[in-house]
Image: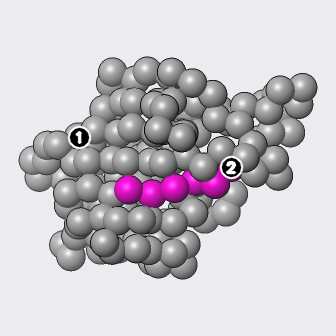
Amino acid sequence: MSRLDVKQIQEIIPHRHPFLLVDYIEDYEPGQYAVGYKCVTYREDFFKGHFPQEPVMPGVLTVEALAQVGAVAILSKEENKGKIAYFGGIQKCKFKGKVVPGDKVKLETKIIKQKGPVGVGEAVASVDGKVVVSAELTFMVGK
């Protein structure tokens, strides 16, 4: 297994606090897949407004976290170092559960297609083995 801490993740992708949504990578293979985690705490900035009476991590931020894990997979390839992976589209997205303070979200993104700078990742977020979000994420690698 190839583990990355937050400092190593920041050497691969350009995201920074408060928008870096991955705490660590448990395993990855450049250009193939990455498995990471987001440890959700009540202190996350978005909980101030989403929703104060019932804090729920916005689903779109869970999708973004999945995209960041996919970006680690694709941008860790030697030829992509120093580049940025941009969103190209989100397909087949399903929200199946809530992410709340105290959850440890497992983020898995597998690159299933790539042609030139454009590719697709199959992404699944889960909490305690239960899928909370699944989607196909299209990306484009650029400068």
- Kind of element beneath mark 2: loop
Per the rendered image, the range of residues in magenta is 35-40
Q: Is residue 29 visible?
A: yes
The quadrant the C terminus occupies is: bottom left
Residue at horizontal 64%, vertical 54%? 39
Where does label 1 land, which residue?
120
Where does label 2 land, which residue?
40
Residue at horizontal 79%, vertical 32%? 55
Q: Left of 88 or right of it: where is 54?
A: right
Q: Left of 120 or right of it: where is 93?
A: right
Circles 2 and 1: CB atoms closer than 8 Å? no
Residue 8 locus on image (x, y percent) = 47, 78
The quadrant the N terminus occupies is: bottom left
25 vs 7: above or below: above
Q: What kind of colouring is applied to the model shown?
A: one colour
Q: Is residue 44 visible?
A: no
Crowding at label 2, few (<14), some or many (≥20) Cα neighbours within 10 Å? Answer: some
Query: Between residues 111 and 138, which one lies in front from this camera angle?
Result: 111
